[in-house]
Image (cartoon, grey):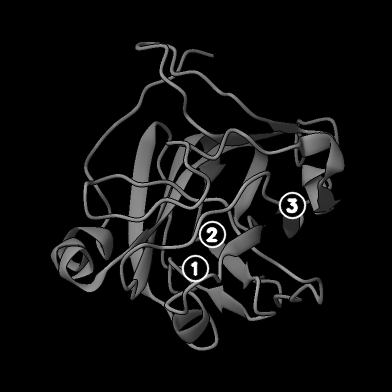
Amino acid sequence: MKRAILFATLGIGLAMVASTAHAQGITGVPYLNNININGAGYSGDWNNVATTNVLDVTTGADQGLEFQVNNGPNGSGGENANSFSTFYSYIPTSVSPNVPVTGAVITFTWNSGDAVAGINVVYALDDSANGTDYYFPTAGYDLTPQPGHTYSYYVPLVDPNLTDLNTPGDVVNGFNLQLDPANVYGPYDITFNSITLVPEPASMGLIGGATCLLAARRRRTA
């Protein structure tokens, strides 16, 4: 059964990266790997399982913020179902967008896990003008992820983020990641690679590829 999403009432924000010359990074680094996981807030199965500075096993390149959950049937949680989980953190540094931004692209890799039906990925941006918005890149349980695949989705920014992040001096200063893996039975492993603010010209070019699942594969060793 799909669980109802309970939104955190925290002030929320996000670390992001630039993937093209036209994209606007938030933290100034290319991946979600500079987060202080010891100072973050957790709920559900993500407590004490986060890993940053994740490296690609083939190229050695930085990958992002990883959650390795050993729960559910045959996991450390016995027969307990995987639970709705959240991760909240302020970001270490922030920069203002230097061009008008209209959207954001989230990229994540489903490293392993038996998803028998859709998962729901949600994130929120918190800006320095006290604006908070939630974004649903997978449109609610529409994604049944496959191990070793990377997915990327574009979403348009909405107010107050849209107005605030196009106001000089306003920045993104934290983030909240949320995942409902109710249809994942047993352990799973997900890496959130990046979230990128994009201006309108770039976002228009990204919509087609970002609203569909990317065909890129990333194979990880056990």
Question: What residue is disc 1 on?
Answer: 141
Q: CA distance from mark 2 to mark 3?
A: 22 Å
Amino acid beneath label 2: Ile
Residue at numbered disc 2 = 119
- Mark 1 is on which residue type? Tyr
Q: Quadrant of the N terminus?
A: bottom right
Image spot of residue 205 (x, y percent): 13, 64
Structural crowding at the residue carrying mark 2, measured as other residues with C-alpha within 10 Å and reported as few (<14), some (14–19) or many (≥20):
many
Q: Which mark is nearer the camera, 3 or 1?
A: 3
Between the residue at mark 1 and the residue at mark 2, the CA separation in whole angstroms equals 5 Å
Mark 3 lies on a secondary structure that is strand
Q: Quadrant of residue 155?
A: bottom left
Task: Name the residue located 42 percent from the left edge and 67 percent from the top edge.
Answer: 142
Cβ–Cβ below 8 Å for labels 1 and 2?
A: yes
Residue 119 is at least partly visible in this image: yes
Horizontal placement of 193 versus 11: left or right?
left
Measuring from the top left, give residue 195's x and y in whole percent: 45, 53
Left or right: residue 141 compared with residue 131: left
Give the residue number, with chain letter if any, for mark 3.
Answer: 89
Q: x%, y% of residue 92?
A: 68, 44
Q: Residue at x 83, y 51 (%)?
A: 42
Q: Quadrant of residue 46?
A: top right
Q: x, y (%) of residue 203?
A: 23, 67
The residue sitting at 77% across, 55% down in the picture is 83
* Residue 194 placement: quadrant: top left
What is the spatial separation of the Cα atoms under label 3 and label 1, in whole angstroms?
25 Å
N-terminal of the pair, mark 1 or mark 2, is 2
Question: Which of pointers 2 and 3 lies earlier in the amino acid sequence?
Answer: 3
Given residues 34 and 85, the one toward you in this image is 34
Q: Return the residue nearer the eye: 74 or 217.
A: 217
